[in-house]
Image (cartoon, rainbow, N blue to C red):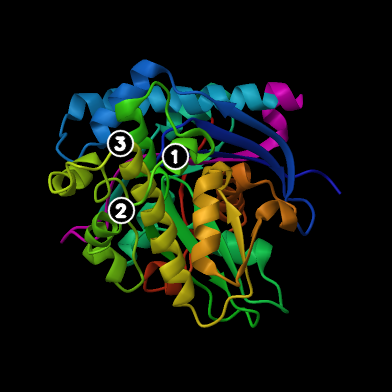
Amino acid sequence: MATQYYVGLMSGTSMDGVDAVLVDFSSTKPQLIATHEQQISAGLLQQLHTLADPKTGDINLLGQCDRACGELFALATNELLKKAQVTSAQVIAIGSHGQTVRHMPNLPHPFSLQIGDASTIATACDIDTVADFRRKDIALGGQGAPLVPAFHQQLFHDQHQDRVILNIGGISNITWLDRDNNQTLGFDTGPGNTLLDCWYQQHHQGNYDKSGAWAASGQADQQLLEKLLQHPYFKASAPKSTGRELFNLAWLQQYLADFPHLSDQDIQATLAQLTAVSIADDIKKLPNVDQVFICGGGIYNLDLIERLNAQLGDITVASTDALGLAPPWVEAIAFAWLAYCFIEHKTSNLPRVTGARKAAILGAFYPAN
């Protein structure tokens, strides 16, 4: 059977690079052919952090970053294809998530804004590009997120087991896959790595706490943890989605004024505990869970995974490696799948997850020519 190559591009809340994957959809299960991670330059990263600050309203900066991210995603794609020794003519389409700079699903006019000009990607790569996946779902009354549960359902459902797929990126989200395959649930649980990364960057060179070693050197403070867990988001019912608009350094700082005695590493330990507890609390509310499979960069935070294991008790925790898909690439593959669904005229949202009025074909088409 002839190959059906698609490229998936993903840059998440953590802004730690662009994940690019080449996926073949010619068989029943998507085949991961090649991967590439493209670093974000320090200058662009600083601009993106500025743009993602809820207080920022600079339209010139938005326009420039949109084009710069388009060029970055195009570079990631071309480097990926070079590595795979595949030509642009062999690729049916690119699915680009873009870089989220604002996610505001609860306003009177809700929106979610991902930048990375898809026309720039399409022309620079000479490949048709599908992007803007969230807008249709929001137009239908949904949150526009999370979108990956539909992909999780397609790939990871098991008729003998009630599973949770847990993605720990900047924000954490879970997908509950019931064995009967008719009650799939999914939502953002709250912070993943975003607060951990921000606090680490305040006190160290580097972007993240490798293996969670700094957090492991501290002691979580129960009083601070309880204060942080009082945020209404943790008690809200699904459908729900969030981002760094809610969980950011400014939000954290307003609590820290009452805890001047805590060391920096104790605060880091508390933030790790916040992520673990908020995830586990939501998992334990689900009807039944036999096993949790983790993807996303958070799986490499050994301290965080240890804390999560302690919170989940008897529930078995494993990597999506056990299901045949390497944890760092699951989300990027999902956006290749979303592009595939668009081209094949298949619906790709789950109204039960996002709150949309109906299932829909997601994305907008940007032709190469």
Q: Secondary structure at mark 2?
A: loop
Q: Quadrant of residue 49?
A: top left
Q: Nearest the camera: 50 or 232?
A: 232
The picture quadrant where one finds residue 346 is bottom right
Q: Is residue 287 magenta?
A: no
Q: Is residue 228 above or below residue 9?
A: below
Q: Amino acid at mark 1?
A: Ser
Give the CA separation, mark 3 to mark 2. Answer: 11 Å
- Of 254 and 351, the residue lying toward us: 254
In this rendering, would 138 be left or right of 34?
Answer: left
Instruction: Report the label total.
Output: 3
Disc 2 residue type (three-letter) = Asp
Percent across and percent down for residue 50 are 24, 29
Q: Is residue 204 visible?
A: yes
Asked whether, in this view, residue 65 is left or right of residue 56, the answer is right
Q: Residues within 10 Å of mark 1 (few under 14, many from 20)?
A: few
Q: Is residue 355 left or right of residue 55?
A: right
Which residue is at 58% across, 29% downward? 37
Give above or below for 312 relative to 102.
below
The disc, 1 or 3, on the residue closer to the chain's N-terminal end is 1
> Which residue position is annotated with label 3?
264
Give coordinates of residue 290: x percent, y percent. Answer: 63, 75
Residue 5 visible within the image: no
Q: Which residue is mark 1?
A: 217
Q: CA distance from mark 2 to mark 1?
A: 13 Å
Which one is nearer the viewer's eye here, 96 or 316? 316
Crowdedness near tag 2: few (<14), some (14–19) or many (≥20) residues, C-alpha within 10 Å = some
Which residue is pictured at 45% across the width and 34% down the height? 209
Residue for badge 2: 221
Q: Earlier in the sequence, mark 3 or mark 2?
A: 2
Q: Which residues are magenta?
A: 82-110
